[in-house]
Image (cartoon, rainbow, N blue to C red):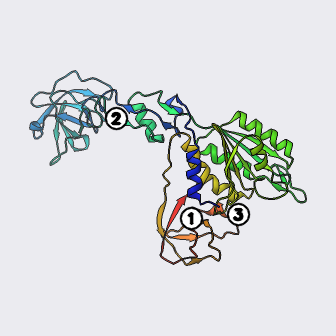
Amino acid sequence: MITLEQAIEIAFTNAVTLDIEKVDFMQSAGCILAQDVFADADMPPFNKSAMDGYACRSADLALELSVVEVIPAGYSPTKKIGPGECSKIMTGAQVPEGADKVFMVEYSVETAPGKVRFSGEKTNPNICQKGEDLKAGDLVLSSGIWLKPQHIAMLASVGCVRPTVYKKPQIGIISTGSELVNPEQKPQSSQIRNSNGPQLYTQATAVGFPANYYGIVPDDKQLTREIILKSVAENDVTILSGGVSVGDFDFVPQIISDLGFEIHFNKISIKPGQHTTFASKGKKYIVGLPGNPVSSFIQFEVFVLPFLRKLMNYTQHETRMALPMSHKFSRKKSDREECLPVQITEQDEVRMVDYHGSAHIHAYHQASGFINIPAGKTEIKKGEIVYVRPL
């Protein structure tokens, strides 16, 4: 068996980066930027008031001032500020020529109609200078960035409404197993509801990947072959749950080989998710995940998701929180790396969740995330720092 790290390296080596395309910036969240974005103008484009107040000359701050005009946001000033003058100005409005300070309206006193005086002791300039955030031609976003809501705002601010991004891989999801029934059905003897399909579909779409769900295929070799062929034709990556172990009806690996795919590995030294298969044929990929729900859930997070993003020319940097264990933990078997669900307490400590194994998906409804315990490690001491991957 190979390690998870080795599995990811193999998958990355065989990943062929998808083409680029221009998309509506409002639909670009979750995409990977393929070209640099530059500012098309200074930001802010003019000296801008940072608050509601009065724009004046610093030299006149102690004087009674004549209000020469009111400047709302979006309005171009018509009056230049001279000695003993000011303009009432709103937040975001253009500061008039001649003014180098804005004092807050809260620190003003109207002394007569059209007359005002600063009532504070001192004040900041309260002016955002033209170009202080960006100057025309400045690099705004570098290629390779995973676009998030804050980046969409940046694209909007520089008028980049059709950014160039890498295409997102289209995902096909198949659940295998004659024991499975749809969630709306009541299971009969020897049947269970299919949770893997809806789970994997949601895991994919929740992070922005388009997905086709093909439902349940029974343990029939011809039917399984047909649905795999359909998914391969319609998608970049086909994800199957079940049928990849070593049982009499686990014939997915044979079908994959018969279809001309190269199986790069079919086992990973990890728990849960040991029987994970990865295969490729040109720009098409098949990932076979174990049928137990926690196995498929975890393997999507730690293996499938980084691979999908690699197809968009992005190497995922995992976010992990370093926190102390609230109690001692030990395990009997340490031959494999293991992912275990945990909670983060109100004291910012890590507590293990009651977990019964790879079929116990209910353990994850109360989990803040999970930790990876490396192979060979049997004990975590109270107070020892562990690294939590949030969910």
| Marks 3/1: CA–CA distance | 15 Å
Q: Earlier in the sequence, mark 3 or mark 1?
A: 3
Label 2 and label 1: CA atoms lie apart by 38 Å
Which residue is painted at 27% across and 23% down in the image?
76
- Sort mark 1 into few (<14), some (14-19) or many (20+) by Cα contacts within 10 Å: some
236 sits to left or right of 346: right
Left-right relation of 299 to 255: left
Residue 55 as seen in the image, left or right of residue 159: left
Q: Position of residue 114 (x, y in %)?
A: 19, 30
Residue at (62% x, 73% y) in the render: 334
Assess whether mark 2 and mark 3 are in contact (beta carbons under 8 angstroms): no
In the rendered view, tell whether residue 220 sits above or below residue 141: below
Q: Is residue 23 visible?
A: no
Residue 338, given in percent of the width and then of the height, sits at 61, 66
Q: Quadrant of residue 83?
A: top left
Vertical comparison of 256 with 331: above or below = above
Residue 330, by quadrant, is: bottom right
Q: Nearer the viewer, residue 257 or 70?
A: 257
User: Pointer 3: what residue?
Assistant: 358
Query: Left of 23 or right of it: where is 262?
Result: right
Q: Which SS class for mark 2?
A: strand
Using the image, determine if residue 65 lies above or below residue 355. Answer: above
Q: Secondary structure at mark 3?
A: loop
Instruction: Identify the amino acid type marked 2.
Output: Leu
Task: Determine crowd level at label 3: few under 14, some 14-19, many 20+ residues with C-alpha closer than 10 A.
Answer: many
The tag earlier along the polypeptide, 3 or 2, is: 2
Amino acid carrying mark 1 in the image: Asn
Residue designated by label 2: 139
Residue underneath mark 1: 372
Label 1: element kind: strand
Q: Which mark is residue 97?
A: none
